[in-house]
Amino acid sequence: MKAHFIFIGKQTIRMLLLTFFVSLAAFILISISPIDPLQANVGQVALGSMSPEQIAKLEAYWGVGEPPAERFFTWAGDFFRGDMGVSLLYRQPVAKVIGVKLVNSLWLMAIAWLMSGIAGFVLGVLAGLREGSLLDKLIKGYSLLIASTPAFWLALVLLMVFAVWLKILPIGLSVPIGVEASGVTIADRIRHAILPAVTLSITGIANITLHTREKMIEIMESDYVLFARARGESTFEIVKNHALRNVLLPALTLQFASISEIFGGSVLVEQTFSYPGLGQAAVTAGLGSDVPLLLGITVISALFVFGGNLTANLLYGIIDPRIRRGGARA
Amino acid sequence: MEEKKVILDIRNFSVSFEQYEKGFQKTKLPVIRDLDVTVHGGEMVAVVGSSGSGKSLLAHGILGILPYNASMGGELIYDGAALTKERQMALRGNEIVLVPQSLAFLDPLMKIGPQIRKGKKDRASKERLNQIFAGYHLKEEVQGLYPFELSGGMNRRVLVSTALMGTPRLVIADEPTPGLHMEMVRRVMSHFRELADKGAGVLLITHDLEQALEVADRVVVFYAGTTVEDAPASDFRSEETLRHPYSKALWRALPQNGLQFIKGTQPYVKELPKGCPFGPRCESCTEQCKGEIPSREVRGGRVRCIHAV
């Protein structure tokens, strides 16, 4: 029991340190970025026609000239008290902006996460089982090709094929243009999410397939599979009794660790499809020097990735008897 | 008599590996050549050879589980008929069983009970396993343990149990007692002796001549991929009754016989000398030893040495 408390305590400290340093890094990057918030958001022409007082007001609004350290710690202090601040671009509380964007992104990422996980696992198991066969070569070739393809490029190709040439799927956004919010159906939302979700899934599959394949080959060459064969188990029985059991553990870890990749991929994919999710908001906030929003998104993303890795660690302890029962005995 | 029946007869058995050398040039690496072993029902035959002599491949060859880049030759006769791939598949785990050397050969994530039952859940399998465990004084709770949870005393009995789910007529024990003290070795060996006494043929593959002599009826000495001598275990009581210079050298290396070792090491497959593989380390080696060395019958045993009398 005591060990559990120590574990929870350690993880909490880790999480706090992680969020602190990640937000600090993001803040430093945006502070030294050459983007002038006034020029970016107000425009050169508009600025030229303004009085110095007006410009001073705008500078105060965008935080120009404020000492960076003071600015960061003011934000951090507020954040710690539960106030994420107000987005400078959206003029709404950051929590609210993130809430809306996160819902859009979340199910996009959830679909991609599940699809890439399941498809990657199945492909990896098949390829590993038949190492060196034509099937294996095809799956491996596909995975290597996809792994070296930038997500945004793949997004553009899919966009051209399905939205521009075939015209069967919308070209972007998450809802139809010119329709009232109340008139948007679930079907509309699904249609708009298909392309981004598929792009994200396809790019996510490669990594999981290659790792699962590698692990599967290792298992099929193990002593216990050799012995199972010596005991007359067929390949099907070996897969059912031993291979799946042993490959599932690393696959699960990989699956939860891949949350970070899905998150990273979503930034590019959402940008390409003009899909109003968290990724796109991050890009907008970065380019527009919207410090509170960018830091808010950074922290939320870091928490997500941290949560994914933590879940993987915890699951390992629950599923792997060597840790679960071994730990209890020690 | 039923006991005298030949269960396994291996003649001129060979295993070679295909290897790629310097790009795409394929070469064959003959790891085992001219191996002859015969096992009768109720008999325990030990194949003794130092590590790296290809002993495990003999077991894998009989079971048909050699790696894909290995090919075998020679005659494998089981129960009066050639041991084909189909027969190997049908018999292994059933009539022909392997007892592995360590727990590493068990799936670390599968509980002992289901694993020994090969995942079968029917009543007959469960009852059979309960019987086997009772026979080895293993508690029923052991079936619910994972391999890593077994104690040193239990794991040997569990490994032997894996062989008994079928109706074993040929038991192959591949180095079943690595690093165990003599007391444990005797106990493990007694399990195999028991199986042999019940009528099964037992093929014990080991590097330890001493423990082979404890229990085996016959000893086959294996050197650099070849059987050099096949003799009754009783012939190992004195140096004179042995036939091959390598067997004699093994005998002299036993602790009770003075622990005398001969110089040199077993040659690697690629650097085998012509003719007798033991030639370069043999005191009585002559020019004739560089030719073909046939296996001959000498004083009730078989030997591959032209000087043996």
Image (spheres, rainbow, N blue to C red):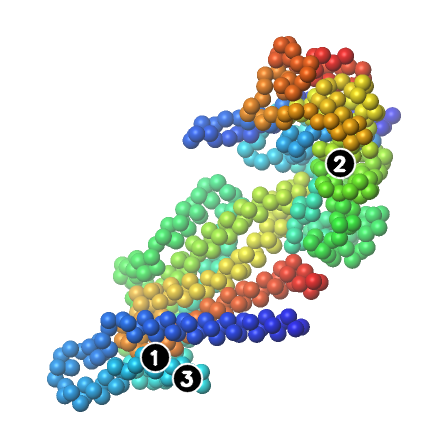
Give a yes or no on whether discs 2 and 1 share a subunit. no
- Separation of marks 2 and 3 at Cα, in angstroms: 73 Å
Q: Are marks 2 and 3 in contact (CB under 8 Å)?
A: no
Identify which amino acid the numbered label 1 is placed on: Ala
Question: Does residue A236 sit above or below A282 in this rendering?
Answer: above
- Separation of marks 3 and 1 at Cα, in angstroms: 12 Å
Of residue B35 and residue A38, the one placed in the foreground of this image is A38
Q: Residues within 10 Å of mark 3 (few under 14, many from 20)?
A: few
Q: What secondary structure is found at the residue carrying circle 2?
A: strand
Whether residue A100 is visible: no
Disc 3: which residue = A77
Whether residue B59 is visible: yes
Identify which amino acid the numbered label 2 is placed on: Val
Residue B146: image x %, image y %? 70, 55
* Count of numbered marks: 3
Q: What secondary structure is found at the residue carrying circle 3?
A: helix
Residue at 65 percent across and 50 percent down: it is B107
Chain letter of the residue beneath label 1 in the structure image: A
Q: Are marks 3 and 1 in contact (CB under 8 Å)?
A: no
Closer to the chain start, of discs 3 and 1, is 1
Disc 2: which residue = B171
Identify which amino acid the numbered label 3 is placed on: Gly
- Separation of marks 2 and 1 at Cα, in angstroms: 76 Å
Residue at 61 percent across and 63 percent down: it is A317
Residue A91: image x %, image y %? 31, 85
Residue located farthest toward the bottom when viewing the structure as drawn? A53
Disc 1: which residue = A69
Q: Is residue A236 left or right of residue B240?
A: left
Q: Residues within 10 Å of mark 2 (few under 14, many from 20)?
A: many
Residue A235, image quadrant: top right
Q: Is residue A223 left or right of residue B22?
A: right
